[in-house]
Image (cartoon, rainbow, N blue to C red):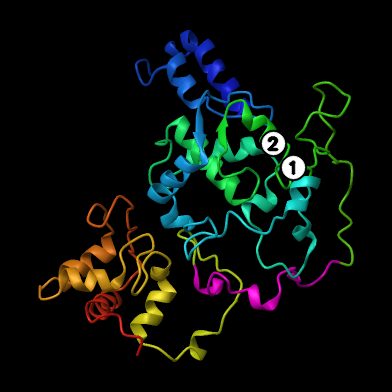
């Protein structure tokens, strides 16, 4: 819980008698101290709020394989679902606290361990948000273990390391980018000023002269890395027609391959389903084998459009309401035929 949220919760508790006098008594109630405490689980850079517990690298490997690898890859170097967590750091970075590859314009990927400056941030995020399909389901010991495994993959701690509420403080002193964060901004208390915050720069005035007619998009990524996650121009947000930068060939240029394969790529189906290998959901080969010889096409068309969960595991497949009936039918027929590439 953020400090603002804590203050708001305390204010609501203090004003409970006044709220009861409002025109709608009995609608809702103030949060109890126990309920507020259940949400107040943030861990700060000074390790305030860090729970007791411990976990070894070895145990973390097992938890990772069971609950994390399907989205983040076996060694946290990613698969087709999420970008890498580990990689791009060196032994020298651990010594200096600055990741050298962040200064290289030709380095294709910024991993989590290249960027993060506080180990408490990693613990806090894993604890409150992971796994993606069951957040806050990990025990504190499992969080320590998974973080120990990640730190080992990043070559910050050795294979036999046990991470706990005491040793984590020493780990902070070995984080590759620990010196890569600045506190010289208005969101951080001023240096030497006690609790007084740095003043934001609000004195400037906009000139509104000689403005550019068009915004030039500049990126340090080399050309070969633009389409690392597919053609962004074909990936819509769920709300609104916001499209990404064109990072692949136009549709007119991609005539090779089966029409249903191109449809699956365009809809993002292949981010969770491999043709022959399982990613988050089952492979199309598994689906075809399960329904072979059964008259299931119509039911599968409805399932593709409506979404569902529980048949292939706990990760839900989102609904695809924007798919036309004929598109969903084409996808299902293509999958049941073995997902041919031609």
Q: Residue at x 16, y 70 (%)?
A: 291
Q: Earlier in the sequence, mark 1 or mark 2?
A: 2
What percent of the width, then of the height, locates residue 48? 63, 23
The quadrant of the picture occupied by the C terminus is bottom left
Task: Estimate the x, y position of residue 277 in percent, counting from the top left.
Answer: 35, 69
Measured as percent of width and height from the top left, residue 163 is found at 56, 34
As for residue 212 lying within the magenta part, the answer is yes
Towards the viewer: 221 or 164:
164
Q: Badge 2: few (under 14), some or many (20 or more) residues near its Cα, within 10 Å? A: some
- Do we see residue 331 in this rendering? yes
**Farthest top residue in view:** 17
Q: Is residue 289 left or right of residue 88?
A: left
Query: Is the residue under label 2 in contact with that under label 1 (CB below 8 Å)?
Result: yes
Residue 222, compared with residue 71, is above or below; it is below
User: What secondary structure is the magenta-colored segment mainly?
Assistant: loop
Specify the quadrant of the image occupied by residue 340. Answer: bottom left
Q: Is residue 7 above or below residue 96?
A: above
- Find out whether residue 59 is within the magenta segment: no
Q: Quadrant of the N terminus?
A: top right
What residue does disc 1 label?
Answer: 178
Q: Which residue is mark 2?
A: 172
Element at badge 1?
loop
* First to last magenta residue range: 211-235
Residue farthest left in this picture: 294
Using the image, tell me which numbered label, if any, was put on residue 110: none
Please state which of residues 302 and 144 is positioned toward the viewer in this rendering.
Answer: 144
> In the shown orientation, is residue 114 left or right of residue 317?
right
At 24% across and 52% down in the image, what residue appears?
Answer: 310
Callout 1: 10 Å neighbours few (<14), some, many (20+)? many
Q: Residue at x 32, y 64 (%)?
A: 321
Q: Position of residue 67 (x, y in %)?
A: 40, 47
In terms of secondary structure, where does tag 2 sit? helix
């Amino acid at each position: 819980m953020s400090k603002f949220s804590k203050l708001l919760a305390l204010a609501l508790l203090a004003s409970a008698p006044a709220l009861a006098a409002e025109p709608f008594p009995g609608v809702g109630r103030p949060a109890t101290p126990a309920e507020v405490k259940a949400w107040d689980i943030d861990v700060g850079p000074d390790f305030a709020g860090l729970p007791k517990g411990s976990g070894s690298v070895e145990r973390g490997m097992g938890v990772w394989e069971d609950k994390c690898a399907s989205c983040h890859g076996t060694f946290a170097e990613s698969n087709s679902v999420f970008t890498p967590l580990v990689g791009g750091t060196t032994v020298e970075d651990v010594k200096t606290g600055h990741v050298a590859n962040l200064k290289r314009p030709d380095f294709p990927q910024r991993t989590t361990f290249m960027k993060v400056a506080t180990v408490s941030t990693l613990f806090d995020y894993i604890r409150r948000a992971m796994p993606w399909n069951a957040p806050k389901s990990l025990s504190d010991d499992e969080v320590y273990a998974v973080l120990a495994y990640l730190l080992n993959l990043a070559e910050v701690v050795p294979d036999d390391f046990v991470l706990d509420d005491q040793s984590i403080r020493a780990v902070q002193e070995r984080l590759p980018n620990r010196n890569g964060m600045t506190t010289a901004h208005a969101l951080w208390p001023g240096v030497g000023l006690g609790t007084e915050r740095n003043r934001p720069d609000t004195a400037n005035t906009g000139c509104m002269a000689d403005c550019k007619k068009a915004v030039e998009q500049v990126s340090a990524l080399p050309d070969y890395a633009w389409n690392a996650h597919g053609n962004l121009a074909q990936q819509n947000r769920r709300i609104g027609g916001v499209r990404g930068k064109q990072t692949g060939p136009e549709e007119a240029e991609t005539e090779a391959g089966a029409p249903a394969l191109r449809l699956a790529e365009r809809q993002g189906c292949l981010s969770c389903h491999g043709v022959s290998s399982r990613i988050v959901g089952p492979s199309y080969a598994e689906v075809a084998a399960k329904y072979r010889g059964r008259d299931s096409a119509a039911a599968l068309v409805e399932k593709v459009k409506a979404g569902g969960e529980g048949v292939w595991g706990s990760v839900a497949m989102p609904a695809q309401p924007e798919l036309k009936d004929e598109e969903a039918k084409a996808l299902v027929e293509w999958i049941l035929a073995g997902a041919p590439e031609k």
